[in-house]
């Protein structure tokens, strides 16, 4: 196994194998996996348990309870790991280094992710763009433009590699020289739809192709809604560009809401069926998007500190949109506060920044508007 | 003066003349008129007052105070009345019969309205459609379709006879055989824009062309925002179809909100400048409209009982969309309650309607959904 396909911290191969084996048990999704690990501690102990012990875990029927110990000595995990090694597929384990932090915050994060390409720290600043497969020329143009604009603003664009909006969003991000992640409802070696094989290769070079399913898993209608929770789970927000009634994009939007992520929708002509889903979302409270600014201005403080492509540490998505002077003032403020949310005096910020007082004051106005700092009484400011 | 051009109750001609004369004083808008009438009681007494007495009314400067008594004996009002008689223009006075009841509910109703055509009782069920002069083909198509659909649903379509959306809305209503009212920012004998002279004639035959300004008044940029308050004031709600930033349609929407009327907006493609205003309205809480149903379902109980084109008395706009059986059940309910909001027993409604109990029960469900009645404990229902 190449170092590339090992989880990035040094979990013994034995343990990785058991995690993969657990993922390969048909019928064990992320929720049952979590229940089993809560009950038994490690995958190894799950496989060592008796069917009766396994059946004592909520919602596991006798058939599945019997199937798990039967797989304890199967070669299936070795086969998968060897395939991953051969085809340069990384395996990321939930709770271990390298796993996307935003995704681990959802209720049912995938136990493992198979990754072609690479997920980088800056991918914590991701926005999903999803929508109809049968998109119109208008929808495709908007998806491509938003993908490009988000990429230029420093965001990674997440989508599902589907026909229509998904593909346009990936392409837009890449054309702008940005990063993009495609989450599959099949295995990462079984790209669906087949005509997107070439697009998948480009995505691998500009980001990652990922799936929670073993690499050769066939696409299956049941796996796509599951996939959608990963699309939204990886992202600060989900933008729906075009969606018919009852479409997958609406499922992704609902999941995003449940996961506490922002939901955005692009309106369109009312005489087009593909506008219905977006308009319903707007009625239900999704933010109406006319331009990338409508998306960017919604993002406030991040769950965790994130690292941008140029290596800056940011605590709010709004920091991505700052000019040089604004960054300088914010850095002076952070330096004085020791990186904490401690009030600092504006006079000290002026001294520390080396800028003119008038310029610092004007910049503080901008930073306030972007909700990065707050003014306090007594000429003080504090990080939001 | 023909009976047609007299207000429909028997106000002496002398008084009409003084009302018209007051309307002809340059600088007296609806607000000053109201202040003067509050102070002096009748237009006659306004003209009999001294400049000093007039100047004691708030916000009236010395120049205007001197101009009013100077007009006391001018022939201007006789000229206007004689012109109205000759050209079949009705004069409606605020507070007198024939004046649109919804319009008299706004803060600053016009003191008089010059009307070519006729305003009928059923015009209390009006919806305004407004929007951009430089509308796109999409906007024009939507305005025409909504105009037609509202007309078919029994609503009068109000607009401003402007190029673009306004004209399309009037045309849609008339093509569907419905009624339409055009409110002008010029006098009703000075149709603007000139190329809508023919359209104005059609509107007169299918409803009314109205203005608060004397018939020959030239269009003037200042009169259009004033005109917009009449467009919204005549209507239960205002639908904005396409509007650029800072357009007149947005003024009408704001006035509608201030007047307590519903505001609706039709979304459109985000790459079209003409969608901006509509999208801003939606962000600000206007109802997003995809079809006429989105408009109709918003209208609840009416301010006053209205009479439909087929002579029915309705207390809620939702009653316009009822089928025969639904009307029959509602009529039985109203009959038992003596037209009041008094609870009646469902069994009595079954008996009174002469319909099968199962049919009455199903119909009650529909009427409940349309918010026309509410169920009460003990198998009773009551009007909303």
Image: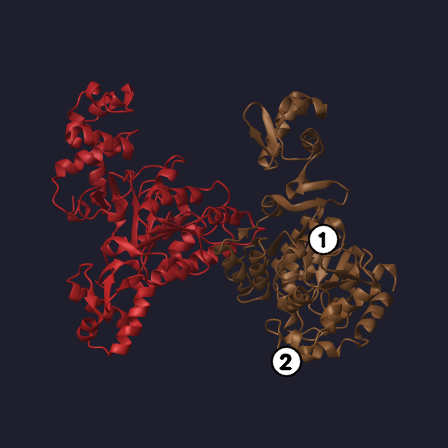
Chain colours: A red, B brown
Q: Quick one: SS at disc 2? A: helix
Q: Is residue A324 above or below residue A271?
A: below
Measured from the top left, where is residue B178 in percent x and y? 74, 50
Can you tell which quarter of the image residue B380 is in?
top right
Q: Earlier in the sequence, mark 2 or mark 1?
A: 2
The chain to which mark 2 is attached is B
B57 with respect to A76 (left or right) = right
Can you tell which quarter of the image residue B188 is in?
bottom right
Q: Name the residue beneath numbered marker 1.
A: B173
B323 with respect to A326 (left or right) = right
| Residue A193 visible in this rendered orientation of the protein | no
Q: Nearer the viewer, residue B19 or A112?
A: B19
Question: Are discs 2 and 1 both within one chain?
Answer: yes
Measured from the top left, where is residue B245 in percent x and y? 53, 66
Q: Quick one: SS at disc 1? A: helix
Q: In which quarter of the image is the C terminus of chain A?
A: bottom left
- Residue at 59% across / 51% down in the picture? A271
Q: Is residue A114 above or below residue A65?
A: below
Q: Name the residue beneath numbered marker 2.
A: B62
Q: Which of B381 and B45 is in front in this view?
A: B45
> From mark 2 to mark 1, how far is it between C-alphas?
47 Å
Can you tell which quarter of the image residue B313 is in?
top right
Q: Which of B237 and B99 is in front in this view?
A: B99
Measured from the top left, where is residue A250 in percent x and y? 44, 43
- Residue at 73% across / 63% down in the picture? B112
Q: Which mark is residue A3?
A: none
Q: Which of A50 and A293 is in front in this view?
A: A293
The chain to which mark 1 is attached is B
A57 with respect to B11 (left or right) = left
Q: Counting other residues with Cα less than 10 Å from the Cα at mark 2, is it few (<14), some (14-19), or many (20 or more)? A: few
Measured from the top left, where is residue A289 in percent x and y? 45, 56
Counting every numbered tag in the picture gives: 2
């Amino acid at each position: 196994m190449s170092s590339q396909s090992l989880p990035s911290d040094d979990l013994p191969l034995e343990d990785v194998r058991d995690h993969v084996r657990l993922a390969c048990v048909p019928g064990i999704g992320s929720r049952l996996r979590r229940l089993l690990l809560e009950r038994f501690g490690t995958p190894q102990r799950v496989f060592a348990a008796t069917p009766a012990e396994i059946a004592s875990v909520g919602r596991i029927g006798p058939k599945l309870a019997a199937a798990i110990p039967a797989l304890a000595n199967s070669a299936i995990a070795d086969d998968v790991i060897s395939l991953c090694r051969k085809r340069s597929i990384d395996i990321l384990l939930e709770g271990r280094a390298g796993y996307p932090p935003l995704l681990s915050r959802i209720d049912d994060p995938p136990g493992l992710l198979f990754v072609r390409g690479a997920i980088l720290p800056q991918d914590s600043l991701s926005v999903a763009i999803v929508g109809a497969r049968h998109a119109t020329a208008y929808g495709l143009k908007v998806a491509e433009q938003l993908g490009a604009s988000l990429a230029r603003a420093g965001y990674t664009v997440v989508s599902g590699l589907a026909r229509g909006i998904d593909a346009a969003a990936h392409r837009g991000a890449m054309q702008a020289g940005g990063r993009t992640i495609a989450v599959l409802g099949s295995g990462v070696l079984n790209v669906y739809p087949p005509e997107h094989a070439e697009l998948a290769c480009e995505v691998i070079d500009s980001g990652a192709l990922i799936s929670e399913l073993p690499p050769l898993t066939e696409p299956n209608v049941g796996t796509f809604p599951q996939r959608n929770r990963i699309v939204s789970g990886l992202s600060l927000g989900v933008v729906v560009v075009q969606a018919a009634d009852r479409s997958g994009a609406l499922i992704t939007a609902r999941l995003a809401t449940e996961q506490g992520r922002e939901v955005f929708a692009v309106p369109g002509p009312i005489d087009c069926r593909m506008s219905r889903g977006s308009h319903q979302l707007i009625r239900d409270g999704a933010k109406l998007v006319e331009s990338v600014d409508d998306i960017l201005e919604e993002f406030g403080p991040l769950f965790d500190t994130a690292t941008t492509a140029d290596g800056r540490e940011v605590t709010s998505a709004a920091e991505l949109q700052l000019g040089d002077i604004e960054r300088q003032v914010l850095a002076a403020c952070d330096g004085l506060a020791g990186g904490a949310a401690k009030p600092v005096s504006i006079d000290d910020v002026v001294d520390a920044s080396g800028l003119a007082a008038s310029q610092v004051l004007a910049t503080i106005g901008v930073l306030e508007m972007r909700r990065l700092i707050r003014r306090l009484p007594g000429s003080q400011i504090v990080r939001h």
